[in-house]
Image (cartoon, rainbow, N blue to C red):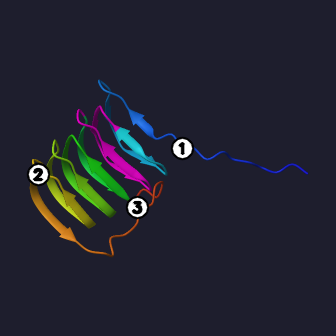
């Protein structure tokens, strides 16, 4: 008897340097951004904004590491890590926050251990 087998995708979605996207992204996995995104991102996994990455919009995810630039509204259900090279301008809602010396954070932060889990594909992110 044949068994339906769907391989688990361990590779993250990647937006490479020099790539610019205008629009919304929804994923069940992780995403790494080294390019530019002008739009909303919903991820059940980790969003990683690389040192040359720029995101402008609304992001909802489980975990987030920022090395580059983010401007907008950020909702992280678990851990938000702002690395030394990061620049964040906007409103943050997270359960846990880690800020390295040198990171720039301008905006508001609300910490709550009951931040809702993002639901990719639900259309719950509006611009």
Q: Is 115 located above or below residue 125 in the figure?
A: below
Q: Secondary structure at mark 1?
A: loop
Position in image of residue 37 (x %, y %):
29, 37
Which stretch did the figure color magenta? Answer: 33-52
Residue at (43%, 54%) from the top-left corner? 45
68 falls in the magenta region:
no
Of 122 and 55, nearer the camera is 55
Q: Are marks 2 and 1 in contact (CB under 8 Å)?
A: no
Q: Is 40 located above or below residue 44 in the figure?
A: above
Q: Secondary structure at mark 2?
A: loop
Tell me how far mark 1 sits from mark 3, CA to CA.
Answer: 19 Å
**Residue 126 appears in view:** no
| Residue denoted by label 2 | 101
**Reading the chain from its start, which is encountered first: label 2 or label 3?**
2
How many callouts does the rendering have? 3
Position in image of residue 106 (x %, y %):
8, 54
Circle 1 residues within 10 Å: few <14, some 14–19, many ≥20: few
């Amino acid at each position: 008897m044949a068994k339906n087998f769907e391989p688990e995708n361990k590779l993250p979605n990647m937006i490479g340097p020099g790539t610019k996207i205008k629009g919304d992204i929804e994923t069940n996995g992780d995403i790494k951004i080294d390019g530019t995104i002008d739009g909303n991102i919903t991820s059940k996994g980790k969003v990683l904004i690389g040192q040359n990455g720029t995101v402008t919009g609304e992001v909802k995810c489980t975990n987030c590491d920022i090395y580059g630039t983010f401007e907008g509204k950020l909702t992280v259900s678990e851990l938000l890590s702002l690395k030394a090279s990061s620049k964040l301008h906007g409103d943050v809602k997270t359960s846990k926050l880690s800020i390295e010396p040198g990171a720039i954070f301008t905006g508001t932060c609300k910490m709550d251990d009951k931040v809702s889990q993002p639901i990719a594909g639900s259309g719950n992110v509006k611009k």
